[in-house]
Amino acid sequence: MKKIIFATNNPNKLEEVQKMLGSRYQIIGMADAGIDEDIPENEATLEGNARVKADYIYQKLKLPVIADDTGLEVDYLNGAPGVHSARYAGPDKNAEENMRKVLSSLLLVKNRKAQFRTVICLRINEQTHFFEGVVHGSILHEKHGAAGFGYDPIFKPDGFQLSFAQMPLQVKNRISHRGRAVQKLAAFLLRNNF
């Protein structure tokens, strides 16, 4: 089983990615890899933030690393919160406050189109590779569901009647932004025999 460090301490993300990559890989979070620093995410793009996190851990451990950054991009808000999604309502990364801010910004707004976009950066064998996943959908008028995390309760993907927070994890993983990016990552790892 090959070890890959995932630049996150979010147990939900670790579980999602481990399930998607399967038993060929062991996905290890930052804490289990002995890294407890909070890596700054000050770049202007999702790609930049993912790369900074992957580079930081790769330089420390010299092991394969994946890092991701995800943004909710709302049409009416000109792509916001985007790269600032985790801290949209303030520095505490409070999901409830972030959702409340998005919902209050869209009161009485008809155009509720949005997309989730994830960029994964893989650092392996001194190489850097990027994988992107996008899912289109819309912002609901209120929260629905208790599963998932982040903005999941207010995002309904196109073609579905449920929010991400109402879906079984295996369904969400198949169609989500992170799921699509991880599928590309998995295909790359297999194709290159990593």
Image (cartoon, rainbow, N blue to C red):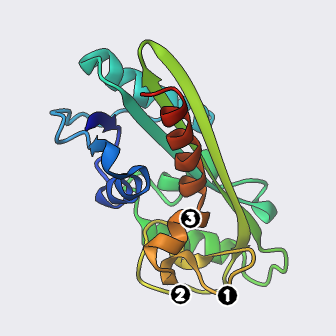
Most extreme residue toward the right, as rendered?
A: 110
Relative vertical location of residue 173 with respect to residue 107 in this rendering, above or below: above
Q: Residue at x 50, y 60 (%)?
A: 89
Does residue 189 appear in the picture of this structure?
A: yes
Q: Residue at x 35, y 26 (%)?
A: 64
Q: How far, Cα to Cα, is label 1 from label 3?
A: 16 Å
**Residue 73 at x, y = what percent?**
69, 57
Q: Amino acid at mark 3?
A: Arg
- Residue 161's label in the rendered image is 1
Does residue 42 appear in the picture of this structure?
A: no
Q: Quadrant of the N terminus?
A: top left
| Secondary structure of the residue carrying numbered label 2 | loop
Instruction: Compare residues 181 and 99 and report the one nearer the observer.
Output: 181
- Residue position marked by numbered label 2 in the rendering: 144
Relative vertical location of residue 168 with respect to residue 50 in this rendering, above or below: below
- Residue 174's label in the rendered image is 3
Q: Quadrant of residue 161?
A: bottom right
